[in-house]
Image: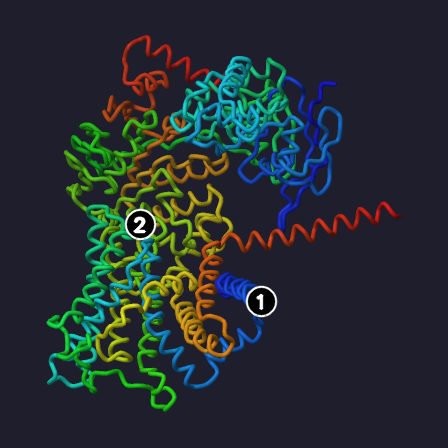
Amino acid sequence: MGDFLSVTELTKAFPGVLANDHINLTLHRGEVHAILGENGAGKSTLMKLIYGLYEPDSGEILLEGNPVHFHSPRDAIHAGIGMVHQHFMLIPALTVADNVVLGDEPGHIRYDRKQAEEKVRSLSNQYKLTVDATAKVGDLSVGLQQRVEILKAFYRKAKLLILDEPTALLTPQETEELFSIIRHLRDEGIPILFISHKLDEVRAVANRVTVMRAGKTVATLSVAGTTSQQLANLMVGRDVVLRIEKQPQQRGSVLLDIRNLEVQDKDKHPRVRGVSFQVHAGEVFGLAGIDGNGQFELVDAIAGLLNVFRGSVWFDGQNITRLSPGARTATGIAYVPQDRQVEGLVLNFDLVENLMLRDFRRRPFSRNGWLSRQAAVKYANDLIQRFDIRPPDALRKAADLSGGNQQKVILAREVARDPKLLIVAQPTRGLDVGAIEGIHRQLLHLRDLGKAILLVSLELDEIMSLSDRIGVIHSGVLQDIVDAKTVTREKIGLLMTGSRSDEGARILSSDIQEVRKP
Amino acid sequence: MTPGVRSVVRGLGLPILASLFAIVIGAIVVAAIGFNPITVYGSLLSGAFGNLFSIGATLSGAVPLILIGLGIAIAFKAGVFNIGAEGQYWVGAIASVWVSYHFTGLPGWLHIILALVAGMLAGAVWGGVIPGLAKAYVGAHEVITTMMMSYIGILLAQYMIEEPNAPMRQPGYIPESPMIPNNVQLPFLPMKAFVQSQLSIGIFIALIAAVVVWLLLQKTTFGFQIRTVGYNQRAAKYAGVHVAWYTILALGMSGLFAGLAGGVQMLGVAHQLNDSFASQYGYTAIVVALLARNNPFGCIIAGIFFAALSTGGQTMQQFSGVPASLTDVLTGLVVFFVAAEQLIPEIRAWFRRNKDRRRIAGVQEGGKTA
């Protein structure tokens, strides 16, 4: 029998929602099986049912042909199911070996650290999960921490590995390393369930894919014969446009003029070094770069959240270098910051308060220092309808909304002010295909209305499909500005590493190609 | 129920549950040391609310707790912890008393306002401006600075009257300041029992202050900015709020109310600065704000609750023989349950799970026998 795990007619209801509706799934030995679905499609619930965090209302789970009933994750672990959560459950102050064996330590009363390290080393050799057993987890990169999580699962004798959105926090390089680990494990005969909402990744690493939508399994396909378009349509339930056609550009005058800008972080380290560029009305200027190369400090400085160390920022013919963030907003700059939960929203505020967050000083939201709740509620309801924010309840706290809808709230707030310049940082991070399409359309629509848009994204595809011109930043220096119509992704990748040598080009382009097209 | 009403009910649920848990566990403690909980709580209750005199005493004791509690709630709302309200209270008291027995040519009402404003400003400088500036510009943590300033404030008040030649000392053997003139004292409520229990119109000042704080926090851009800073400083900066400035303002407002409490207490009850520095209002008020979950109207109820524990405690000791420090146990338990906010939903969930398990077990057994 090739079926390692099979799930039949599994159903789980929560008050008001049928989270899993008669789910069927089979997992063969030695395959990577992706579960693809939008946020809220029921992927996580299904995994929690398999992992014993929830108990099903009805239906059956068969492990190696035998029905199992898990009352807790402990039962599931005991039965050989290992799971790596999206957010790691590690103790940063302990070493790798300590973390792996925690809860099942070798030795009796006295913890035998030597033996723990030995065991971890042999596991890491066996599964090619290279990581230093004596290193402190807090010092490791996110990619290595993930390996520790995988080791934890194997230390507990996992025969099946569940990876819940494993690439969400990884860099492209780490993603590629993870994929080669997954392929290696598959070749060792370990079945892997890979939860994702990213089409490229599913196509890169999975053998078969089960698409979920609204709590149901829509289809199970072999990855080999499918296209991204097919998967996207199945996932969303309608025809999705993966790459939006742009209107010809109507470029206007210069709106934003950055002159020789230098920005330092809190510890006085230079993060942006002598950057100059201009953004015109009616254009999308994309800022590409590997994370941590100063792009977010640059836009924070333009928005007024970071102080400018040297150089100047001109907007619409006016020097705004010394203006406060509030005053910059008033001149017509809108800003969608990269971290919507930490910066863009106050999660404990309701949508009314969040939608007026940057405009509460002016009418109709307040008058001589007194808030006008009524006007704010009316405004919020209007925006909720216009931008299709769900659930359409202005009194809901921002924390209760899905990531896509939180992003819509921020975008609605910033766009509704009718700004001349919109700065967007990572506008689609963590969103699903349907939501991404909506936000991309919105941005291009604004461009066609003659707004200037400064787009910062770590997704090269996003930059390339939306931008008219692309600036590439590397360690705080703007390497070059290129025309998006003619540039190749290899050229941009080369600039992103800051090297112009042919060797760099070869390594990087092969990297990118491997990630995107297996 | 509309969502608004529901959230109010949910907001009230936890403090009430916490108080109930505290009372139940207090009863167990009382029973364990050999007293009848019903008599003990009965005497506590009648001591706090049994007649007009005790009601007056309870409300009078609640005034400083409500006022200081409001101030601490404002600081909490802005995400800062004003732990030094006790010192701000005394600094406010010093300023109010000093103004009260100077400027004697003024009409009474104007003199009262002047004295209270002096107390408010002194409290604001002590609690807000100094620790606030220290926090905003050199990063000194407000828990440390407000507490240190608090000790200085309390000792300053002692210094004012302690030694024979102290600045505010009345000639004589007793360490006390001159009396506040009659026309600068806050009038008592016009009933004999209230005059005896020293319930002044300070209670109305406290009630009005609660309304003012509520309006300020919920209805003004000032309050909106305070709350934004309290929830998320980075989002506040992004929203164009001057975070450092609003941190200072919040601590300043916090001290302002503590200073007002000192002034009202001096003008309404003590009528002079005397050697009574063990009031502890500034500390109990932290618990008031906690129990009220920073809701201004909750501060009124919580202030009365703790004042009742204190006045009722005396009677309880007389009549039932249980030491008045039982009320400290109750206070401690309330703090514990409010602080352990997560505990109560956990307990509820545990009960529910247990019920489910019993139900399922019952079904399974039924299945077997059939």
Q: Nearer the viewer, residue A329 or B296?
A: B296
- Is residue B325 positioned above or below B183 on the image? above
Instruction: Find residue B57 and report its horizontal and vertical position in percent.
Output: 38, 80
Q: Chain of mark 1?
A: B
Instruction: Find residue B335 and report its horizontal and vertical position in percent.
Output: 44, 59
User: In this image, B218 relative to A256: left or right?
Assistant: right
- Is residue B175 positioned above or below A134 on the image? below
Instruction: Find residue A110 and report its horizontal and vertical position in percent.
Output: 52, 27
Q: Nearer the viewer, residue A206 or A259?
A: A206
**Helix, strand or loop at mark 2:** helix
Q: Residue at x 42, y 76 (%)?
A: B311
The span from disc 2 to disc 1 (Cα, nearest Å) is 51 Å
Question: Which of the two discs, 2 and 1, sits closer to the camera?
Answer: 1
Look at the numbered discs 2 and 1 and tell me whether their residues touch, using CB distance below 8 Å. Answer: no
- Is residue B287 positioned above or below B116 on the image? above
Res B31 label: 1
**Helix, strand or loop at mark 1:** helix
Characterize the local packing of mark 1: few (<14), some (14-19) or many (20 or more) Cα atoms within 10 angstroms: some
Q: Residue furthest right?
A: B370
Instruction: Find residue A80 and report its horizontal and vertical position in percent.
Output: 65, 26
Res B236 label: 2
Work out whether mark 2 precedes mark 1 in sequence or the reverse, and give the earlier one.
1
Q: Residue at x 38, y 88 (%)?
A: B193
